Amino acid sequence: MDHAIALETQGLRAGPNEFPKVSDALLRKLDVPVPRYTSYPTAPVWTEEIGPGAYASALARAGQKDAPLSLYVHIPFCKERCSFCGCNVAIARSSSTADPYLASLLREMDAVCDLLGSRRSLSQIHWGGGTPTFLDERQIAQLFTAISSRFGILPDAEVAVEIDPKVTSRSQLELLRALGFNRLSMGVQDLDPAVQEAISRIQTPEETRAMLDAARELGFRGINFDLIYGLPRQTPRSWSRTIEQVLEMGPDRAAVYAFAHVPDVRPNQKRLPTVDLPRGLDKLQLFRIAWEAFTKAGYRPIGMDHFARPDDELSQAQSRRTLTRNFQGYSVRAASDVVAVGVSAISDVGGVYAQNTHSISRYGSAVARGELATERGVPLSADDVVRRRIITQIMCNFFVDLGPSAEEEFAGELSRLRELAGEGLVTVNGPEVEVTPLGRIFVRNVASIFDGYLTGHGRPFSRAV
């Protein structure tokens, strides 16, 4: 009852289309660097102690199971470097540049398959980048044929690809669909010309709409738009217009990411006009605009930054509290083991996170020698596995049951959660923790309570807002 009174007093009982109120004092307290928890343990914990040998052992362990896998393929090439981008990319003009890299991908898949043995079925495939449609049609067909000849793709598998509408042709879309791709995600970011000029990403609404219409006509489902708030020159008026245009197009899903300004990690971001970056309450206001517009239009908030139509399987999974997530995003088909190939690709397999080298030349040299290109990673301890499950439940389903021994195992965490309950971010009922509408805005802060490694690592995280 006390928590309910506190929520009412702070005005946090928001209506279905009303964004929770956030005081300036609470924002100052919570807007701190905090992980996005695409993994746990997070990347700063990873070390070079996990190399090719440790990853090979993890693949061999994973091969002893009998369950589908997820496969991620990283295509690093782009024709231009966007100044906001935080991905590992290589700039090239001609698709022929990718031929040696594709040969390396095939060699790596052979090495991985040898270690996996007979465990080859796939419930999920995701091509990311970079820009996968940098590849021409011959290369797309070659790569997919290589995958399907080495793995067994389940009939109901999610087969997804990231595309850039500026460089993707209708014939490429037709080929992808014919090969079996059934989902796609479009990079949109912002449709305002002034913002696009600031981030070096020029893309007209007409190009975006044409690609969406073509994808729907071809039978793609779960079509997602990636949007980013907190970019230079975004204003409430310009951002509202972008969201209005997006809703007129009506994608099945939208990811509305907070811009992660980390120029020390991504030097290309130093080109941004940082004086024009919205911060603090101004940045949160942009997310509020998107949140209220999407929910008013009938979309449901998913996880910390996604929206989906009510009939979309992500919405249905969250309603059942069965939504999950991996490096490729929220999913209902993510497997317990994720095998990733390509430069900088991250596998989550056999109780180990293993990341390939970021260098295309080192990657190619390693696989040419018949070696894996693993550069760093971390093995998960029993405690890591428990905490990862908790963090995933919080980040995906806004609820977790800590179990009958919660008071003994998580006494310190429960004490801190009760402090957050006093601020309206969660409710705590015995071992059950539920994130409130306000807490969903700061769900990374809530999840961080269970992070056993949060202090003592130098790499900067993006801010909570």
Image (cartoon, helix red, strand yellow):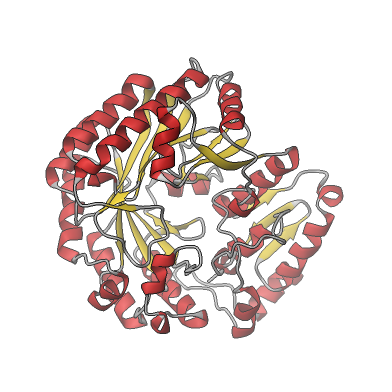
Residue 141 place in picture, x, y as percent: 22, 31
Task: State left or right for residue 160 relative to residue 47.
Answer: left
| Front residue of this view, candidates 227 and 83 | 83
Task: State left or right for residue 414 relative to residue 301.
Answer: right
| Front residue of this view, candidates 438 and 296 | 438
Residue 356 place in picture, x, y as percent: 49, 40
Q: What residue lies at 71% left-to-right and 55% top-to-bottom?
A: 453
- Quick one: quadrant of the N terminus? bottom right
Residue 423 place in picture, x, y as percent: 69, 73
Residue 222, compared with residue 303, is above or below; it is: above
Residue 149, compared with residue 374, is above or below; it is: above
Residue 71 in view here:
no
| Front residue of this view, candidates 225 and 271 | 271
| Front residue of this view, candidates 32 and 46 | 46
Q: On the image, which quarter does residue 257 sit in?
A: bottom left
Residue 334 place in picture, x, y as percent: 48, 37
Q: What residue lies at 79% left-to-right and 58% top-to-bottom?
A: 414
Q: Residue furthest top?
A: 118
